[in-house]
């Protein structure tokens, strides 16, 4: 059964569109399960009814004619119960409904399973038999497994179908994801080259056949050169068999019949990547079906060769493209380095199919003031290159091919945003002080050079977190000590005499350096942050030396250690920092030993705050990671994004405990996670007594306006109220209602949102 399951899913994945997907399902399932009937019903978004969309075994005329509301008939009952219904004699069931158009009276046994995607019943998969018999457990389990696997494919195909053009008219289509960075952008899609996987190249047409043929021939030529060069380079190291493999690759690429097959499809207006993928997958299948194991093993080689050429096709496509004036970058998994490739003045929005609001790329987008939506899992992004699109970073929505009415609405939101930003401008010179005279230090998180100017314009009083990994991420090798010194000097100088907190290299998790790959099955629990740098003292020492050298004559450097999970790591790091300091002094540098602080972002550190605070000069909570580790929710995974709550009661209690114990040890306590930049979160942190709130420059004016509008004494009451609440949603609701009551709702989102 597993083999059948895999082959059905594979075939479905390669289908052109939704009708083709459904056709494959009904044909293959009927065949594999030896049933008389297999049908698929899908939910019609407008009416909410379930419509017979494809069948083998029922009258074809019934397709599109049979509609069932949830709860109506057996299919409707599968929908409301959200579980399979398995009946020996369907017509004896009280919910049974007879539809003459289907010719259904001939069938007795019925098994229907729901197709569920993101908790929504997309449809129902049904098999039927003429005789009276109950489908056995194995059959039921097979259909349930298949439905679960098909749900994502059907959702994707539906989404692609929603974008299909009706004649010349482009259809407006909406997609939902996670709101990752506020703001609205209206621009043109620029797709970041996706991975070279033959099985996931979606069907797309080409308009200019000649250009597409040329693209294909160029990609083929580049792949040929690449393989030949690699073969030459490795000549001495390869045995005869391995050399033969290179020759086989070259001769496959030289084989004219392969190119002819692909060109034929391109002439039928199939895009070059898709035409190539279709042809290569057919060859892969042919090899896989061979009885001789030698030839079966060659299937992997053909797949590999196919992926290589596909990669060249993608690169050729990319190199032909310029960025438009209003680029909206869309990719399977955007990274900070990819964002940095687009000239800043042309980039106006970002969308990622994977990832979540707390992924690092989302944090960078917020720092850049770039509207962003993450985790748009069903977006058939490869089909919308160049399309016009609206990114709604408030609601986490995208509108592809927006019509005039929608564009007008969003244009007015953009205008309102500008107005709001202008209204906040005057705050830059005013103190961050509550209405009852309590001062809070509002600092900024930086990483990019562009942050510096924005931060100073907005009245930042210091840097609470300089993410040193950002300049590391934007290079193709480790920056040297001198290069680092220059980068750090710019930061320290720009903010002097204000303090600048530089965090030592925090890589691992979702922050990967292309030149220092860390491959792990569980990266967030793996080799991350301080763990990497303590294992590589040469990297750590070069970095802290560069920081200290950069601080000569400025004296505004603070060094901070990420991901501390116990006292031993702090002690080991302190030894290295002190050693670097001593050596620099011996070398003649006139510098002061900078304060050394730690981030509290691992649960173990919460329970050791007292000991850690006694040994550190300051502490700062990394609430992004602390939330992820306390709730065991991967901050980068959109599937679990709905249970990642920075205002979860457990997180709030931990935050309060950290500041209480930190203060008892006479240590200043700050926070530099995203919660500090959220107006509601900032109120609770103020009430808890946090000394420093550090956030991105974009949010700083909003938070300052919020703090200036409240009395600390009132926020303490709010804190007591929410600390008594049990559910994150309830807490979020209470905080939102409070902001609304004091007239601050307009600060959070433009009206009409
Ligand atoms: C955090 O974890 O809250 C933090 C500030 O660090 P980063 O987001 O860079 O992991
Ligand atoms: Mg962190």
Image (cartoon, helix red, strand yellow):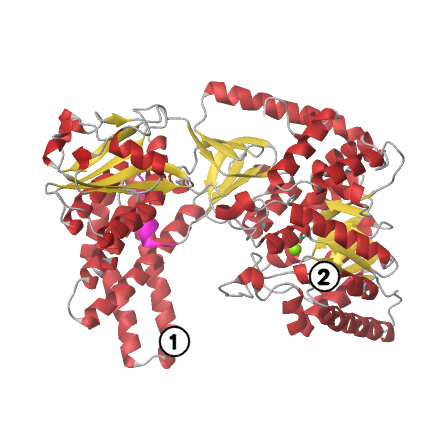
Left or right: 58 in relation to 531 = left
Q: Is residue 355 visible?
A: no
In the depicted structure, whether residue 752 falls above or below residue 94 = above
Residue that badge 2 annotates: 607
Mark positioned earlier in the residue sequence (1 or 2): 1
Residue to which mark 1 is pinned: 234
Q: In x, y percent, where is residue 592?
A: 88, 64
Q: Position of residue 319 (x, y in %)?
A: 44, 48
In the rendered image, which quarter is residue 530 located in? Answer: bottom right
* Magenta stretch contains residue 197: yes
The residue closer to the viewer here, 461 or 221, is 461
User: Residue, x 41% and y 26% (percent of image)?
Assistant: 172
Please provide the residue range marked out in magenta.
196-207
Image quadrant holding the C terminus, namely top right
Residue 747 x %, y %: 70, 28
Q: Circle 1 sits in a helix, a strand or a loop, which is it?
A: loop
Image position, residue 20 (x, y; %) = 23, 39
Residue 664 or residue 225, whichever sits in front = 664
């Amino acid at each position: 059964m597993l083999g059948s399951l895999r082959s059905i899913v594979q075939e479905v994945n390669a289908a052109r569109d939704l009708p083709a997907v459904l056709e494959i399902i009904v044909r293959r399932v009927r065949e594999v399960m030896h049933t008389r009937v297999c049908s698929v019903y899908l939910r019609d978004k407008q009416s909410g009814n379930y419509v017979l969309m494809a069948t083998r075994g029922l009258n074809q005329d019934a397709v599109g004619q049979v509609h069932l509301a949830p709860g109506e008939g057996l299919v409707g009952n599968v929908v409301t119960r959200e579980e399979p219904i398995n009946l020996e004699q369907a017509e004896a069931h009280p919910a049974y409904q007879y539809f003459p158009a289907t010719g259904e009276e001939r069938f007795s046994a019925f098994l229907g399973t729901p197709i569920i995607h993101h908790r929504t019943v997309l449809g129902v998969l049904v098999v039927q038999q003429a005789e009276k018999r109950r489908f056995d457990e194995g059959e039921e389990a097979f259909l349930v497994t298949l439905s679960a696997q098909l749900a994502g494919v059907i959702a994707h195909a539906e989404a692609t179908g929603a974008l299909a053009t009706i004649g010349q008219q482009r259809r407006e289509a909406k997609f939902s994801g996670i709101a990752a960075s506020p703001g609205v952008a209206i621009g043109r899609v620029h797709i970041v080259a996706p991975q070279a996987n033959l099985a996931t190249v979606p069907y797309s047409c080409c308009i200019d056949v000649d250009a597409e043929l040329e693209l294909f021939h160029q990609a083929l030529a580049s792949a040929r050169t690449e393989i030949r060069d690699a073969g030459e380079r490795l000549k001495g190291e390869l045995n005869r068999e391995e050399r033969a493999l290179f020759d086989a690759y070259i001769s496959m690429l030289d084989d004219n019949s392969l190119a002819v097959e692909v060109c034929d499809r391109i002439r039928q207006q199939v895009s070059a990547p898709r035409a190539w993928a279709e042809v290569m997958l057919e060859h892969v299948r042919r090899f896989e079906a061979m009885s001789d194991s030698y030839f079966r093993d060659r299937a992997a080689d053909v797949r590999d060769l196919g992926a290589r050429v596909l990669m060249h096709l993608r690169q050729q496509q990319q190199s032909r493209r310029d960025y438009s004036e209003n680029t909206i970058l869309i990719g399977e998994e955007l990274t900070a380095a990819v964002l940095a490739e687009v000239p800043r003045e042309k980039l106006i929005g970002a969308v990622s199919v994977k990832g979540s609001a707390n992924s690092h790329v989302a944090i960078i987008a917020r720092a850049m003031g770039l509207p962003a939506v993450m985790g748009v899992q069903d977006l058939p992004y490869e089909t919308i290159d160049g399309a016009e699109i609206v990114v709604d970073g408030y609601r986490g929505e995208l509108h592809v091919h927006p019509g005039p009415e929608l564009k007008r609405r969003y244009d007015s939101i953009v205008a309102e945003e500008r107005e709001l930003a202008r209204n906040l401008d005057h705050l830059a010179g005013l103190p961050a002080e509550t209405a009852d005279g309590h001062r809070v230090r509002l600092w900024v998180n930086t990483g990019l050079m562009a942050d510096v100017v924005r931060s100073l314009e907005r009245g930042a009083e210091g840097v609470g977190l300089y993410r040193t990994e950002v300049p590391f991420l934007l290079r193709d090798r480790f920056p040297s000590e001198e290069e680092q010194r220059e980068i750090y000097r710019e930061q320290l100088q720009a903010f002097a005499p204000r303090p600048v907190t530089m965090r030592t290299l925090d890589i691992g998790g979702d922050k990967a350096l292309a030149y220092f790959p860390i491959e792990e099955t569980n990266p967030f629990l793996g080799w991350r942050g301080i763990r990497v740098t303590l294992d590589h003292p040469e990297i750590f020492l070069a970095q802290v030396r560069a920081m200290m050298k950069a601080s000569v004559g400025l004296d505004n450097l603070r060094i901070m250690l990420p991901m501390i999970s116990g006292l031993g790591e702090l002690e080991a790091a302190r030894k290295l920092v002190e050693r670097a300091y001593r050596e620099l002094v011996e070398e003649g540098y006139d510098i002061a030993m900078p304060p050394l602080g730690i981030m509290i972002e691992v649960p173990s550190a919460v329970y050791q705050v007292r000991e850690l605070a006694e040994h550190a000069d300051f502490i700062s909570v990394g609430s992004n990671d602390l939330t992820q580790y306390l709730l065991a929710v991967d901050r980068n995974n959109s599937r679990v994004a709905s249970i990642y709550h920075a205002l979860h009661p457990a997180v709030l209690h931990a935050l309060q405990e950290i500041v209480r114990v930190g203060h008892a040890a006479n240590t200043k306590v700050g926070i530099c996670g995203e919660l500090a930049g959220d107006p509601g979160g900032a109120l609770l942190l103020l009430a808890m007594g946090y000394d420093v709130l550090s956030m991105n420059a974009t949010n700083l004016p909003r938070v300052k306006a919020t703090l200036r509008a409240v009395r600390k004494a009132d926020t303490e009451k709010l804190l007591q109220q929410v600390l008594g609440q049990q559910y994150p949603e309830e807490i979020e609701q209470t905080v939102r209602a409070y902001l609304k009551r004091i007239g601050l709702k307009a600060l959070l989102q433009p009206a009409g949102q």
